[in-house]
């Protein structure tokens, strides 16, 4: 009989149990790079015996990230820090996972603690975080007050 703590095999991957840590948007990256904060944050779940640990939404293009704090995989420099996390998670017995993301019309947004509204000149003056023009599928803004961002 299987239960939450039974091993589970999906194709060629065996999870030590069915406990999965879902991706959490933490907004702690700089230029898309994972750092020590990420390895500590995610590593603790593997050390606590989770079977699967997902990295937060990771932008596939710089103009498709949601905030300045998003993880990224749009250049080669971003590979090694994520690989370091995956290696640590595996060493602790967890299967590493990643949520790939593209924010679309919500790109160039402030981190939640700064208001979850579009990045603007004030953000650039206060924190050196300039807005960027996002690649989106439609000229329609995300919501009222958001810029139209179609290229």
Image: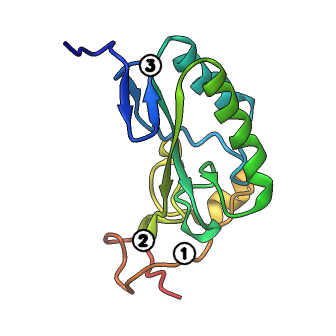
The spot of residue 61 in percent (x, y) is: 61, 67
- Marks 1 and 3 sit apart, C-alpha to C-alpha, by 40 Å
Q: Which residue is depicted at the point 42% across and 71% down?
A: 105
Quadrant in the picture for residue 125 = bottom right
Nearest to the observer: residue 56 or residue 117: 56
The spot of residue 122 in percent (x, y) is: 63, 60
**SS at mark 3 in the image:** loop
**SS at mark 1 in the image:** loop
**SS at mark 2 in the image:** helix
Q: Which residue is the site of mark 1?
A: 134
Q: Which residue is the site of mark 2?
A: 105
Q: Pointers 2 and 3 in contact (CB under 8 A)?
A: no
Return the disc, 1 or 3, that comes first in the chain's sequence: 3
How crowded pointer 2 is (Cα within 10 Å; few <14, some 14-19, many 20+) is rated as: many
Q: Which residue is the site of mark 3?
A: 16
Nearest to the observer: residue 139 or residue 8: 8
Q: In which quadrant will I find the N terminus? A: top left
Nearest to the observer: residue 126 or residue 135: 135
- Marks 2 and 1 sit apart, C-alpha to C-alpha, by 7 Å
Q: Please identify, in this view, whether the residue under mark 2 or under mark 3 is nearer the observer.
A: 3
Left or right of residue 135, residue 34 in this image? right
The spot of residue 19 in percent (x, y) is: 37, 22
How crowded pointer 3 is (Cα within 10 Å; few <14, some 14-19, many 20+) is rated as: some
Q: Pointers 2 and 1 in contact (CB under 8 A)?
A: yes
């Amino acid at each position: 009989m299987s239960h939450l703590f039974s091993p589970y095999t999906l194709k060629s991957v065996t999870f030590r149990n069915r406990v999965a840590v879902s991706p959490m948007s933490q907004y702690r990256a700089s230029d898309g790079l994972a750092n020590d904060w990420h390895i500590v944050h995610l590593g603790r779940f593997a050390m606590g015996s989770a079977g699967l640990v997902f990295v937060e939404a990771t932008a596939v293009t710089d103009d498709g990230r949601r905030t300045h704090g998003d993880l990224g995989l749009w250049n080669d420099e971003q590979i090694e820090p994520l690989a370091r996390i995956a290696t640590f998670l595996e060493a602790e017995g967890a299967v590493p996972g990643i949520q790939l993301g593209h924010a679309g019309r919500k790109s160039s947004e402030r981190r939640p603690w700064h208001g979850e509204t579009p990045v603007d000149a004030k953000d650039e003056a206060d924190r050196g975080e300039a807005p960027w023009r996002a690649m989106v599928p439609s000229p329609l803004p995300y919501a009222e007050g958001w810029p139209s961002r179609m290229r």
